[in-house]
Amino acid sequence: MSDVALSAAQILRVQRRTVLILSIGQVLGGIAFGATVSLGALLAADISGDDALSGLATASVTLGAALCAIPLARLAARVGRRRALTLGNLFALVGIAVVIAAASLRLFPLLLVGIVMIGAGNAGNLQSRFAATDLASPQHRGRDLSIVVWATTIGGVAGPLLLGPGEVVGEIIGMPPQTGSYAFSFVAQCAALALYLIALRPDPLLTAQRLAVAAAATVGRAIEDRPVVARYAVFAIAGSHVVMASVMAMTPVHLAHMAHGAHGMAPTPADVSALVGITIALHVGGMYALSPLFGILADRWGRLRVVLLGQALLGGALAFAVFVNDQEWGVMVALILLGLGWSAATVAGAALLTEASAPELRTRRQGRSDSLMSLSAAAGAVLAGVLLANFQYAGLGIAASVLVAAIVALSPLAVRRTRQGRATPAP
């Protein structure tokens, strides 16, 4: 009995250390992502000379995440989270260097290649939230996952807010315009890589795999697998992400148009960058700041209820985007609610996907979920650029509301399947 108690205490200590390391890594990794979200659309529009192509920036970052999500998940299943996460950091480092070179040479295709590489690094950041659940107890799974998601707040908010200081630093060291903040991103990615490589020991996924095998052999039963619930969770995560990414991607362009229309003379690039940076920082804060609350609610209320709470918040955001899009404060409120809705749906959906999947299927499904989430968001970002150009910001909000309605409409199926789920014998 004492051995069991000691083993449980050791697992708890490893889990706490893992959540701490993953959280610090998310702070560092979020800086590059926040800068790319803020600058990507502006750089794409500036270098290409066409606002309709600005959506390709967000499409590229999500495409990079989609392409690497499944390979990184498979790599993690074989050799552990530590090596998979460090490989993601290497992708991001290369991507940052390519983006700076593309801005210097003013080569639009090269810019997209660099953003794709940064997106590949973001696949590692996405995997971190699942890594937090590898050793988590079921009653604290949502909380532990949400803590790692919350940690992205610092880096994600700092990234946009570093645009101004980044321009000063970039000018001093001779970097191309609107790329100075990537100097901070590069340093942060180097620190994250060293952190994972040195400190993420023992590997949480490899440890969890060994514990699952031992538990199945001892108890004689495997954790139940509920594929219908898992599929609904994947759809809810992907759909919510599409709504968030498509509206967010076009907001910098919409704000730039608003700034030009609101002043008698054309605003300076610094004015536009400041407005965009503040708005995106508020949005990213909404995405991550309250994630622990949503994690606790998911543990107490149930995963599905919090997913639906996320849809209510997303619906409110889209209402502001449709009806108050001509006011800066209205756009800011829309982006804050958009971030909160994404946070609730993503935290609860990821916890639902994890607990609805048998241990031998979890990593595979997590990788597929991240890949589908990113691929669909990439397509949504491209379509969002077309919608903005032809139907304005309000038309984009109306189109995004279709996905929110679909997630709500399909939720009863997940409720019934959850209640009818049964455990299956271990092989």
Image (cartoon, rainbow, N blue to C red):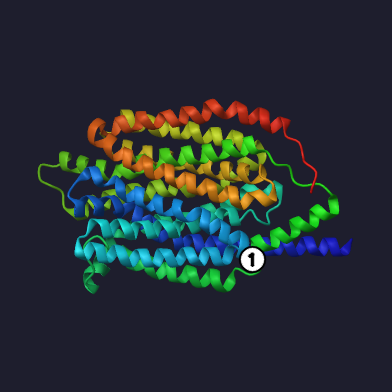
Q: Secondary structure at mark 1?
A: loop
The residue drawn where x is 58% and y is 53% is 130
For residue 33, which quarter of the picture? bottom left
Quarter of the rendering containing residue 262: top left
> How far from the left and from the top, in percent, is residue 8?
78, 60
Q: Which residue is mark 1?
A: 203
Residue 234, above or below 197: above
Quadrant in which the N terminus is drawn:
bottom right
x, y percentage for residue 31? 40, 60
Q: Is residue 420 left or right of residue 103?
A: right
For this view, does 184 lie left or right of residue 18? left
Can residue 221 be seen at all in this image of the molecule? yes
Looking at the image, the residue that sits furthest to the front is 427
Depth check: give the residue in front, 178 or 229: 229
Q: Quadrant of residue 35?
A: bottom left
In x, y percent, where is residue 188? Answer: 42, 67
Residue 165 appears at what percent x and percent y?
Answer: 29, 64
* Residue type highlighted by circle 1: Asp
